[in-house]
Image (cartoon, grey):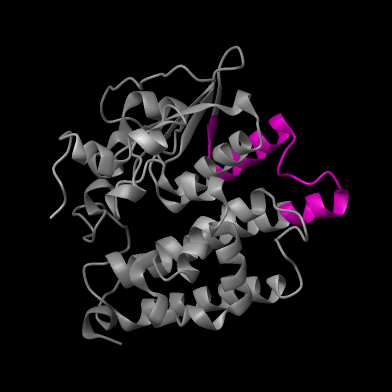
Amino acid sequence: MTDNLSKYTPPKIWKWDSESGGRFAKINRPIAGAIHDKELPVGKHPFQLYSLGTPNGVKVTIMFEELLEAGVTAAEYDAWLINIGEGDQFGSGFVDINPNSKIPALLDHSTTPPTRLFESGSMLVYLAEKFKMFIPTDHAKRTEAMNWLFWQMGSAPFLGGGFGHFYAYAPEKFEYPINRYAMEVKRQMDVLDRHLADNEYFAGDEYSIADMAIFPWYGGLARGVLYESGEFLQVQEYKNLQRWTAQIGARPAAKRGMMVNRTFGEPETQLRERHDASDFENNRQDKRIARGEFEAPE
């Protein structure tokens, strides 16, 4: 254990007197609520999504694209970019939808008044129940899908806020927290791998919202792209998880969903806002760069 960790003694009362450091230090704070007034744009479609192409945001865009792929035209949506690095999530319009100031946030304008949704898991259940798709009707399979959906909601904070923070984002590397969370993440991958040894999907033989929830987090981990930690965690050892990841990643709707509100990676993988199906061809970042709307990345 390092001297910096061993010498720290928590004060009797914690006070917020300085930034904690790390990549997201400027947007982390111990209070909730809006810090500036900003109305959210509203497009032409029934669903208005305000998000970013993080694993939590991608869960919902995959669901929308799967519904549209299945012919559910009532699931058309506008996806507006929320730049969390600039504090867009603390605008008054966003906080009105999500008092927790986290992406994604969603408004369903097909209801009167519009229905607000926050938390990606809630959105997946809402859309599945509204359109009666991607949630099993069989009692046992539905329960299994819900088991795994809530497993993901409870487990991912250890992956993102725990392992990801200390391994990739913390201003300094410390052995104890990295070891602690690496062990937990490998245990989680083993949980998934063992289940997938006997099941094609997480609800058995039926693709569901459970797969959509788990894929952006643990599929990204299995591909070695999440926190660039593939070698460190030896993700290739989890053969069943690798098989499932490749299977979900090959779905056309999943490919499109992973592009929406994405602001990183190769320009051809980024669709910063989505307002029409044609945007995947016409308004990807590489096309916008070619039109001179953005400078090409160095």
Query: How many dots with numbers?
Result: 0
Residue at image position (63%, 55%) is 211
Q: Which residues are magenta?
A: 117-145
Q: Where is residue 157 drawn, in percent x and y? A: 48, 60
Q: Where is residue 170 drawn, in percent x and y? A: 27, 67
Q: Where is residue 160 drawn, in percent x and y? A: 43, 61
**Image height check: is 243 above or below 209?**
below
**Image height check: is 37 above or below 126?**
above
Using the rendered view, name the quadrant where residue 230 is placed: bottom left
- Image-based side of 238 in relation to 204, left or right: left
Name the image quarter holding the C terminus: bottom left
Magenta portion: prevailing SS class: helix
- Residue 141 counted in the magenta span: yes
**Image height check: is 150 above or below 130?**
below
Evaluate whether residue 81 shows in this view: no
- Image-based side of 202 in relation to 213, left or right: right
Name the image quarter holding the N terminus: bottom left
